[in-house]
Amino acid sequence: MSGAWPDAAVTPEQEVIAAARERAAALAARDPERLRRSLHPGFHWTSHTGERFDRDGYVTANTAAAIRWQGQSLTEVEVVVCGQAAVLRCVVADDVITGEGDRVTFRMPVTQTWVKQEGRWQCLAGHAGPRA
């Protein structure tokens, strides 16, 4: 016997938070395939400016556009899981370099809807804003 206690089981809420942080890391990495894996095929997003995106549009806007993500942190995270669906609410700090080359941090509330399919959480929909 090793004497070590096994790690506590990971809760569904922790799984959703980990999936949301992976999505944020994919944004910062500007990795379209990694980001696409985090998003459900039926994904829809409404930005803090009111722009609406499907999955392909969102991936393109966040990996190939002039804005360059440096990071996204999530604070004040709350998750409610109901079966294979979850709602995550948080405040994000988006660290970006604008098309003009300015480094800016945007803070805003975000709501995301996640679904679990084939053992993996994917973001189905989200809304950001307004900017704080």
Image: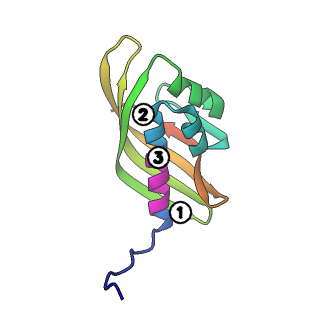
Magenta span main SS: helix
What residue is pinned by disc 1? 81
| Colour style of the rendered protein structure | rainbow
Earlier-in-chain disc, 3 versus 1? 3
Disc 3/disc 2 C-alpha distance (Å): 10 Å
| Label of residue 17 in the image | none
Give the structural element (helix, strand or loop) at label 2. helix
Disc 2/disc 1 C-alpha distance (Å): 26 Å
Which residues lie in the magenta part? 14-21
Q: Amino acid at mark 1?
A: Val
Disc 3/disc 1 C-alpha distance (Å): 18 Å
* Dot 3 alpha-carbon crowd within 10 angstroms: few under 14, some 14 to 19, many 20 or more: some
Earlier-in-chain disc, 3 versus 2? 3
Residue 23 colored in magenta in the image: no
What residue is pinned by disc 2? 28
Q: Is residue 45 visible?
A: yes
Q: Quadrant of residue 67?
A: top left
Above or below, 55 against 12 in this view is above
Residue 58 screen position, x and y as percent: 58, 30
Q: Amino acid at mark 2?
A: Ala
> Residue at coordinates 36% horizontally, 35% vertically from top-left?
71
Report whether 66 appears left or right of 5.
right
